[in-house]
């Protein structure tokens, strides 16, 4: 099991690095969009969509929204508006999840996928094409991905699991 995970991680790391540093920018944006479309397919399962046609329709709808939002966010004012709305959404979602008892409502899960997936795609893709400042876009995106991997790995590491288990016993 560990060998399979390491091999998969190595292959995906090579694909990620090649995509970030070797592909032309438009292709990289399309690849990021494809990854988010696959994410939309997975998200559709949260929304209770079980049939392949329904899940494909949701993923296709999100993909279309990604394309339209990509074009719309080319103007800095629109990008700022979108990212500000996304930050407001995350603040509201945090409060909502903190105060409201969790109840799974499939339709609501589908709707919530849009303000999660679309701004995240725009932010990541726009970072990728950024070429000004102390680092170029691919380097920033790579550091962001490594930060997420580190945070996820630390949360699910054997040490964290052992400490969490001991914490529950105390």
Image: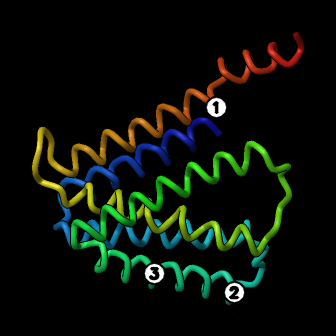
Find residue 90 and report its horizontal and vertical position in percent.
55, 52
Decide: few, some or many residues near mark 3? Use Cα within 10 Å; few <14, some 14-19, many ≥20: some
Circle 1 or circle 3, nearest the eye: 3
Q: Earlier in the sequence, mark 1 or mark 2?
A: 2
134, above or below 89, in the image: above
Which mark identifies residue 156? 1
Where does residue 163 sit, x and y in percent of width and height?
73, 15
Horizontally, residue 108 falls left or right of residue 131, namely right
Viewer-nearest residue: 162 or 148 = 148
Along the line of sight, the residue nearer the viewer: 166 or 6: 166
Q: State which quadrant residue 1 falls in.
A: top right
Residue that badge 2 annotates: 54
Label 1 or label 3, whichever comes before in sequence order? 3
Please indicate whether residue 99 sits to the left or right of residue 127 in the image. Answer: right
- In 3D space, how far apart are the residues under numbered discs 1 and 2 (Cα atoms)? 32 Å
In three-dimensional space, the C-alpha distance between marks 1 and 3, rounded to whole angstroms, equals 33 Å
């Amino acid at each position: 099991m560990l060998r399979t995970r390491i091999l998969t991680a190595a292959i995906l790391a090579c694909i990620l690095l090649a995509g970030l540093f070797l592909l032309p920018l438009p292709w990289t944006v399309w690849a990021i969009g494809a990854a988010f479309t696959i994410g939309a397919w997975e998200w559709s399962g949260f929304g209770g969509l079980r049939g392949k046609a329904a899940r494909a329709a949701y993923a296709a709808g999100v993909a279309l929204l990604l394309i339209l939002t990509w074009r719309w966010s080319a103007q800095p004012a629109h990008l700022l508006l979108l990212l500000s709305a996304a930050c407001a959404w995350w603040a509201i979602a945090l409060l909502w999840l903190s105060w409201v008892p969790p109840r799974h409502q499939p339709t609501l899960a589908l709707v919530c996928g849009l303000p999660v997936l679309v701004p995240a795609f725009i932010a990541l893709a726009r970072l990728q094409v950024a070429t000004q400042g102390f680092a170029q876009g691919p380097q920033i995106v790579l550091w962001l991905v490594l930060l997420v991997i580190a945070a996820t790995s630390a949360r699910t590491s054997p040490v964290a699991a052992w400490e969490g288990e001991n914490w529950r016993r105390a």
